[in-house]
Image: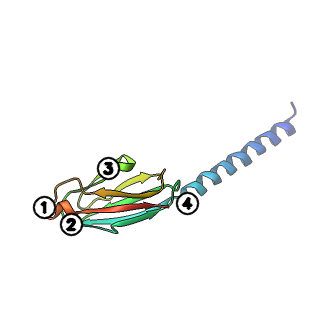
Amino acid sequence: MTIDIRRRRIAAGIVLLGIGGLGAAAAAAEEQVIRVVAKKFDFTPNAIHVKKGVPVVLEFTTADVPMGFNAPDFGVRTDILPGKVARLRIVPDKVGTFDFTCDIFCGSGHEDMSGTIVVT
């Protein structure tokens, strides 16, 4: 094999790697980030609108007390701690309206701390 052929193959490999990297960057750019604030006794927003099959990262914060987020229809939950950002990634795989709740007792009114994920 001549040096010229090797150089062409190396160049082709570099081009293919570059294209693959662009695909990964594009996929990451499509990921939707939704910020959710948990406070006694409310999630803001309390209705989260997403699209089926589109990756979503929910970023939770609270300034109050430890709280939780539980979306049983998607099999996900996380703790939400004061001063920290909790990130939860989901890819909705079904269309509909699904409930989520705070699953760490946060005081009187805790039982009403809920919301919905609306998937279209």
Q: Nearer the viewer, mark 4 or mark 3?
A: 3
* Residue 29 tag number: 4
Q: Position of residue 36 (x, y in %)?
A: 34, 65
Per the image, label 2 sits on a secondary structure element best described as loop
Which callout, 2 or 4, points at the residue further toward the start of the chain? 4
Which callout, 2 or 1, points at the residue further toward the start of the chain? 2
* Residue 77 tag number: 3
On the image, numbered disc 2 is attached to which residue?
41
Q: Position of residue 90 (x, y in %)?
A: 44, 52
Query: Pointer 2 and pointer 1: residues touching (CB < 8 Å)?
Result: yes
Q: Nearer the viewer, residue 10 or 98?
A: 98
Q: Nearer the viewer, residue 74 or 61?
A: 74
Q: Position of residue 97 (x, y in %)?
A: 40, 59
Residue flagged by tag 4: what amino acid is it?
Ala
Per the image, label 1 sits on a secondary structure element best described as loop
Name which residue lies at 37% across and 60% down.
Answer: 59
State the separation of the CA atoms marked 4 and 3: 24 Å
Q: Nearer the viewer, residue 7 or 24?
A: 24
Q: Position of residue 43 (x, y in %)?
A: 29, 66
Name which residue lies at 50% across and 61% down.
Answer: 120
Which callout, 3 or 2, points at the residue further toward the start of the chain? 2
Name which residue lies at 18% across and 61% down.
Answer: 110
Which callout, 4 or 3, points at the residue further toward the start of the chain? 4
Per the image, label 4 sits on a secondary structure element best described as helix
On the image, numbered disc 1 is attached to which residue?
107
Q: Nearer the viewer, mark 2 or mark 4?
A: 2
State the separation of the CA atoms marked 3 and 2: 18 Å
Query: Pointer 1 and pointer 4: residues touching (CB < 8 Å)?
Result: no
Q: Alpha-carbon neighbours of circle 3 within 10 Å: few (<14), some, or many (≥20)?
A: some
Residue flagged by tag 2: what amino acid is it?
Phe
State the separation of the CA atoms marked 1 and 4: 38 Å
